[in-house]
Image: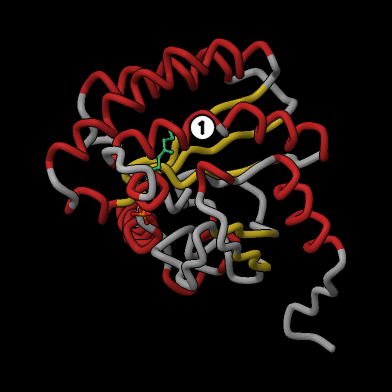
Amino acid sequence: MDGNGRWAKARWLPRAAGHRAGVEVLTPLLETAGELGVEALTLYAFSTENWARPETEVDSLMALFLETAKDKVPELNERGARLRFVGRRERLPQGVRDAVNEAEKLTGDNDKLDVYVALNYGGRGEIVDAARRIMRDGLDPDSLDEATFARYLYAPEVPEVDLVIRTSGELRVSNFLLWQIAYAEFYVTETLWPDFSPEEFRRAIDSFAARQRRRGGV
Ligand code: FPP
């Protein structure tokens, strides 16, 4: 959800206002995802690297996550979305951890759309955390294959990523779902996240649908 800061700067607003505007586009986009038959999507809300931002911005983001959970989770639940959070929860403030646990409990049985929120998430960290759990389980190194490894990721049930949408023109992966995006297609747009509309979401999906995926074959 990149470009919130630039969106705010262009309007002489504080960065927090950009993040707030970024939340506003979530409901229409999730509605569109449902209409388009998307089964699962992951929102990159806060990376392990984002702690390096000024304390005031980090604090305002944590407050925004809490507020968003309060405002949007009941509505998402009514619409049949199942919410899951991926990332290292230990470092998140207790209030955010409680909201995350409650949202997962409340929506756990829903089956219309799986919404994953990457919160204090890093792709390398996820791989390291999986390796730690594998070692703790004492797996025989020779028995380890890709399918077994994938079962130790934060959300083993998450389907392989088909499409990564990157807003605000950045041509980087930024430590996002490194394992899961091995064969993903990319859609990069100059649009800043708060301006990312359902129409453009549809265009991104159309562009994906028109591609031929070869996965290393011919
Ligand atoms: C990146 O834009 C955006 C973030 C670090 C925060 C995104 C979070 C939200 C929109 C809140 C959503 C909440 C939930 C719970 C799903 P940036 O600040 O890097 O923008 P810039 O590149 O223009 O500076």
Instruction: Residue at 65%, 64% (x, y): give it.
Output: 187
In this rendering, is residue 103 above or below 126?
Answer: above
Instruction: Residue at 52%, 68% (x, y): give it.
Output: 143
Residue that lies at the very extreme toward the left in this rendered image: 55
Task: Indicate the quadrant of ligand 1 in the picture.
Answer: top left
Where does the image place residue 198, in percent across and percent down from the top left?
71, 40
Which image quadrant is residue 26 in? top right
Which image quadrant is residue 94 in? top left
Classify 10 Å Cα crowding around label 1: few (below 14), some (14-19), many (20 and above).
many
Q: Nearer the viewer, residue 154 or 44?
A: 44
Q: Is mark 1 within 8 Å of ligand 1?
A: no
Where does the image place residue 158, in percent across and percent down from the top left?
61, 46
Which residue position is annotated with label 1?
Answer: 84
In this rendering, is residue 172 above or below 42?
Answer: below
- Looking at the rendered structure, the kind of residue marked 1 is Arg
How many numbered callouts? Answer: 1
Q: Is residue 82 left or right of residue 106?
A: right
Instruction: Residue at 70%, 17% (x, y): give it.
Output: 79
Where does the image place residue 157, in percent across and percent down from the top left?
61, 43
Instruction: Residue at 51%, 32% (x, y): give it.
Output: 84
Placement of the C terminus among the 4 image quadrants: bottom right
Where does the image place residue 131, in percent across and percent down from the top left?
36, 61
SS type, badge 1:
strand
Residue that lies at the very extreme toward the bottom in this rendered image: 218
How are the colours assigned in the image? secondary structure
Q: Is residue 90 left or right of residue 187?
A: left
